[in-house]
Image: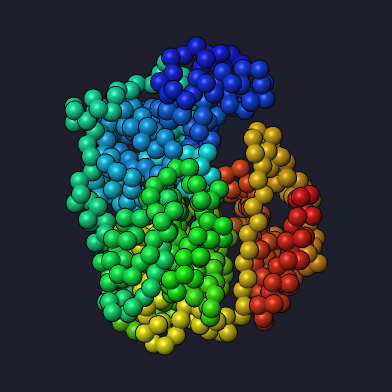
């Protein structure tokens, strides 16, 4: 079947001039043909994501159009005249994919609102809500390498689409032919007819206003003399982040020149990921040249931010867990002092994010809420509070993967607001003769040293996906008794939604939706979490080690990492 699909694509009058030469080049390579055509890109809760190229298992205007046809059919069943907001980041084929989606929606009687330039993911979430749209599309592959692009689908609440809605859209997609069943019109025709409209500048201004409202110490940056290096990693953050920082009084910003302008090839780093030191190296070098206090780095769609802070004569990269705990502590302290802490405040974290944040939250009388991995679950928590008229209870939400949100104006992580709060936090601690590093040390001194690391193991292609499934199944079949020399005392299996306590033999239900996640709790006070990524061909292993000293925590974490590799046979 995949060979027939390949021949059909060869014969089809393909609009994208890059596709036919690619198909011709693999004519004698069965493995490459199979990889492109044996399966279709699956439309899940994160929409589509894949390598750019020809075929049903690739990102191209045809897979984008087919997915959008499914979305349009789904929306037309829900509402007579639905509308959709669209944005895109700096990825290759970004405009082509955004306009392809818009052309399909317009042809199906769905009103389209689209930004006239690249804008971050949080600005898409904001537009969905501000324009009262029924869905949203963000063309992005987040922090993946340059060969990838993607298509994130959003619901009317500004959250990424629910599993139920995504399944319904996917069913529509599966019942359609990629060429014959897709309606579409040229983008220019939709613009001329008024079925496609550009999003008004006032929406962007409202987004910026809502970001600024999340400040907890307004004015602290003015005259603080904060010296900053910033890199948008060739993505969408350059204008929005610099705009907000200027608005709050930060003028001394040096932008990494090689990474300033949008470039989907990301020429200075293979992974435009603020979690990875290599992506931040140019920024770190510039910090040393300029004597900056702080480095900020946002990923291509500007929903995540990484930082490095001055530490003596060098710069220390902080993890997503560390920044999240620091921001939570800063927000709680500031709002407590200002008397603006709401009644029954809550903060939200994912199950793979540090439990240290729970301890910090409780010290301020803030209730922790744990959700599954994926920021949409944090957004859904804000929605549920809003539906009860209690949105103000939400203080902060974050994931260890460098995603943060303060306020409910958007329902996804937002590197623009996070960048503002990080700079505000740095300026505040400097104003009292302290620093971000010193505050982190105070937190560790109070609650113990927590060390968190993540290993990602890649499994490319169809064979890789099959191996990932086999590894997870093997872990569930075998009773794992120890990891890195520490005995397993409890297992949380989110697929079966059961927790097993091996010391007592008791089982209790997990009150969260099913997910392919295993959490091993160990007798040494540490934990190991294993899960396949929902957006990349990877198995991720998270290590949480707690000890009295940083050295002891690091030694324990290394033992856990060795044990986990043995478990996975890697």
Looking at this rendering, what residue extends furthest in the bottom direction?
A: 433
The location of residue 64, given as percent across then percent down, is 43, 30
- Could you tell me which residue is drawn at 68 percent across and 38 percent down? 464
Question: Does 472 appear above or below 54?
Answer: below
Q: From the viewer's perspective, tell me whether residue 229 is left or right of residue 9.
A: left
Q: From the viewer's perspective, tell me whether residue 337 is left or right of residue 171.
A: left
Q: Quadrant of residue 547?
A: bottom right
Q: Quadrant of residue 62?
A: top left
Instruction: Count numbered badges in the picture.
Output: 0
The location of residue 328, given as percent across then percent down, is 44, 72
Q: How is the image coloured?
A: rainbow
Which is nearer the eye, 218 or 334?
A: 218
Question: Does 89 appear above or below 450?
Answer: above
Which is nearer the eye, 202 or 133?
A: 202
- Could you tell me which residue is drawn at 29 percent across and 63 percent down? 244
The location of residue 373, given as percent across then percent down, is 53, 54
Q: Quadrant of residue 94?
A: top left
- Could you tell me which residue is drawn at 28 percent across and 79 percent down? 223
Q: From the viewer's perspective, tell me whether residue 493 is left or right of residue 175.
A: right
Looking at this rendering, what residue extends furthest in the front direction?
A: 289
The quarter of the image holding the N terminus is top right
Q: From the viewer's perspective, tell me whether residue 58 is left or right of residue 218.
A: right
- Could you tell me which residue is drawn at 76 percent across and 50 percent down? 570
Which is nearer the eye, 544 or 248?
A: 248
* Residue 297 visible, this angle: yes
* Residue 378 visible, this angle: no
The location of residue 89, given as percent across then percent down, is 39, 45
């Amino acid at each position: 079947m995949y060979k027939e699909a390949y021949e059909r694509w060869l014969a089809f009058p393909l609009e994208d001039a890059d596709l036919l030469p690619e198909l011709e080049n693999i004519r004698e390579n069965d493995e490459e043909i199979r990889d492109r055509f044996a399966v279709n890109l699956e439309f899940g809760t994160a929409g589509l994501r894949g390598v750019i190229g020809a075929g049903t298992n690739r990102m191209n205007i045809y897979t984008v159009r087919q997915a959008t046809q499914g979305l349009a059919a789904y929306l037309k069943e829900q509402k007579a005249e639905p509308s959709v907001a669209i944005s895109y980041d700096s990825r290759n084929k970004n405009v082509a994919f955004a306009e392809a989606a818009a052309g399909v929606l317009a042809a199906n009687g769905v009103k389209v609102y689209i930004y006239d330039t690249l804008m971050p993911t949080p600005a898409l979430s904001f537009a969905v809500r501000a324009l009262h749209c029924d869905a949203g599309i963000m063309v992005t592959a987040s922090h993946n390498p340059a060969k990838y692009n993607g298509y994130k689908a959003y619901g009317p609440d500004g959250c990424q689409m629910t599993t139920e809605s995504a399944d319904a859209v996917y069913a529509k997609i599966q019942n359609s032919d990629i060429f014959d069943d897709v309606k579409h019109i040229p983008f220019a025709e939709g613009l001329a007819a008024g079925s496609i409209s550009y999003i008004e500048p006032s929406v962007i201004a409202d987004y910026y206003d809502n970001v600024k409202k999340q400040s907890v110490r307004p004015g602290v940056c003015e005259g603080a003399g904060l010296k900053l290096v910033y890199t948008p990693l060739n993505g969408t953050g350059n204008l929005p982040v610099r705009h907000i920082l200027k608005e709050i009084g930060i003028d001394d910003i040096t932008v990494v020149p090689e990474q300033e302008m949008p470039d989907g090839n990301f020429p200075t780093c293979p992974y435009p990921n603020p979690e990875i030191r290599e992506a931040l190296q140019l920024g770190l070098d510039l910090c040393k040249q300029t004597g900056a206090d702080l480095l900020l780095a946002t990923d291509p769609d500007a929903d995540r931010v990484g930082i490095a802070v001055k530490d003596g004569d060098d710069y220390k990269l902080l993890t997503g867990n560390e920044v999240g705990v620091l921001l939570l502590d800063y927000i709680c302290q500031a709002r407590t002092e200002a008397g603006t802490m709401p009644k029954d405040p809550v903060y939200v974290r994912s199950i793979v994010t540090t439990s240290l944040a729970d301890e910090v939250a409780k010290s301020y009388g803030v209730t922790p809420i744990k959700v599954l991995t994926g920021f949409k679950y944090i957004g859904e928590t804000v929605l549920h509070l809003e539906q009860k008229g209690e949105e103000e209870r939400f203080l902060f939400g974050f994931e260890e993967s460098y995603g943060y949100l303060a306020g409910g104006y958007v329902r996804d992580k937002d590197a623009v607001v996070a960048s503002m709060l990080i700079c505000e936090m740095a300026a505040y601690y400097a104003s009292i003769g302290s620093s971000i590093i010193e505050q982190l040390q105070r937190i560790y001194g109070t609650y113990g040293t927590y060390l968190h690391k993540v290993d990602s193991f890649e499994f490319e292609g169809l064979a890789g996906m099959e191996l990932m499934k086999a590894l997870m199944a093997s872990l569930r079949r075998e009773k794992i008794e120890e990891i890195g020399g520490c005995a397993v005392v409890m297992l949380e299996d989110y697929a079966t939604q059961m927790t097993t306590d091996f010391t007592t033999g008791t089982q209790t239900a997990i009150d969260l939706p099913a997910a392919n996640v295993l959490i091993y709790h160990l007798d040494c006070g540490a934990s190991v979490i294993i899960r396949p990524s929902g957006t990349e061909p990877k198995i991720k292993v998270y290590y949480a080690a707690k000890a009295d000293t940083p050295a002891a925590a690091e030694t324990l974490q290394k033992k856990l990492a060795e044990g986990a590799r043995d478990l996975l046979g890697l």
